[in-house]
Amino acid sequence: MPSLAIALNQTRRIAIRNVKQVLVLFPATVIGAWIWGIPGAIGAAVITAAFVTFLSMQDVKAMTSATLREQLISLAGPFGAIVVCSPILIYGNALMGGERDVWLLAAYLAATGVLYLGCYFALIYGLGVLFKDRDNAENLVRQFVHVGMARAGFGGAVRS
């Protein structure tokens, strides 16, 4: 949203959104942390992120006339990939839980990160293949992979 607002010379929207964010984040964090501790502060951050996402979607709708439904549909692929890949992070966290060796901890962290990103981008690529007739981020990832492979000498001609 901020990039769109800047491009359309509507930076006031960014400032208003940021003020609203602070007005929700600060009291929610203080109250959440006071009553429930760290989980309350984390919950406040999640609630604030959802609130700011909704505000941003409203602003995008006002600037582009893209409906909330269209915006949510465009987020379905990445959100689904995150949900599918989340067990990797949960398992990686369990592996690192009691580890005291810094090098082993770094290896677990690196392996978890590489596995998560590999799974995430494979899913996004697969969605791009599945929905290659649509103009979406998943299709863009698919096109980048095809161009990269063609430039590296794999796969022959570039296909879109």
Image (cartoon, rainbow, N blue to C red):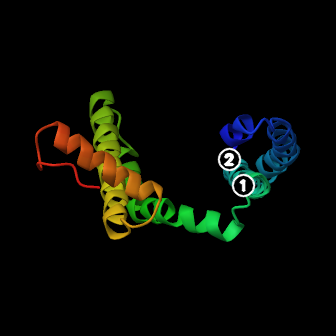
Q: Tell me the residue that label 2 is attached to.
A: 38
Marks 1/2 in contact by CB < 8 Å: the verdict is no
Which three-letter amino acid code belongs to the residue tagged 2? Ile
Q: Point out which mark residue 148 bears.
A: none
Q: Please state which of the two labelled residues, at mark 1 or mark 2, is closer to the viewer.
A: 1
Q: x%, y% of residue 150?
A: 17, 43
Which three-letter amino acid code belongs to the residue tagged 1? Thr
Residue drawn at 75 percent across, 51 percent down? 52
Q: In the drawing, does residue 105 fall left or right of residue 47?
A: left
Residue neighbourhood size for the residue with mark 1, other residues' Cα within 10 Å, grouped as few (<14), some (14–19), many (≥20): few
Q: Secondary structure under badge 1?
A: helix
Q: x%, y% of residue 61?
A: 75, 58
Residue drawn at 67 percent across, 52 percent down? 39
Q: In the drawing, does residue 139 fall left or right of residue 16?
A: left
Q: In the drawing, does residue 82 fall left or right of residue 159?
A: right
Residue 102, quarter of picture: top left
Q: x%, y% of residue 154?
A: 11, 45
Name the outermost residue toward the top.
102
Residue 75, quarter of picture: bottom right
The N terminus, quarter of image: top right
Relative to 84, residue 91 above or below = above
Residue drawn at 86 percent across, 37 percent down? 12
Number of marks in picture? 2
How far is the residue under mark 1 from the one under mark 2? 38 Å
Q: x%, y% of residue 8?
A: 74, 39
Q: Secondary structure under badge 2?
A: helix
Residue drawn at 31 percent across, 31 percent down? 101
Q: Tell me the residue that label 1 is attached to.
A: 64
